[in-house]
Image (spheres, rainbow, N blue to C red):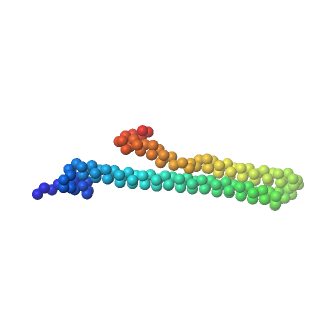
Amino acid sequence: MNDETTPFPGSASRPGSGQGQDNIVDLVRQLTSQGSHLAEQQLQLILAEVREATDDLKAAVAGMLGAAVVGIAGLGVVLMGIAYLLGDAIENLGLATLIVGVVTLVVAAILYVSARKKMSATQLSPERSRRTLERTPGAVRGDLTPGA
């Protein structure tokens, strides 16, 4: 009884064809399947990176909007009660209004600078995927060294 096992599933020899040809066909079929699977995974990675960068950008925009709301609310507060209270305390309503307005605008500026820093740190380009795609031709040739 001859118990031959084939190196790849589904590579049983066909009548009239050599075993080597079947193995090559199976290898090409597997390479095509794996290449397609790798491309799908790479696309999913790129989409995930873009989604992550978009979420960071949304947070930065929300921070800037928050800074604007606080700035406007602060200006409203200046124009309303606090300036009058400070004016009564120092007996100069104009100076009190100016002091409260400056403090409120400084707080709004600090919030804006913080949000702007977060926005500048956000990248919409998927860097990791770009580097992987640059290395892919070398990996196909068998060169797996970093930076190739």
Left or right side of 115 for 47: left
The percent position of residue 106, horizontal first and vertical second, equals 74, 50
State whether residue 5 appears in this view: no
Residue 44 spot, x, y in % from top left: 46, 55
Residue at 34% from the left image edge and 50% from the top image edge: 31
Q: Is residue 30 left or right of residue 94?
A: left
The residue nearer to you, when weighing 39 against 53, is: 39
Q: Quadrant of the N terminus?
A: bottom left
Residue sticking out furthest to the left: 1
Spot occupied by residue 16 in the image (x, y as percentages of width and height): 19, 53
- Image quarter where the C terminus lies is top left
Among all residues in the image, which is located at the extreme front?
A: 16
Farthest residue, direction right: 91
Q: Residue at x 57, y 56 (%)?
A: 55
Residue displayed at 84% across by 58% down: 84
Residue at 71% x, 55% y is: 68
The answer to whether 48 appears left or right of 29 in the picture is right
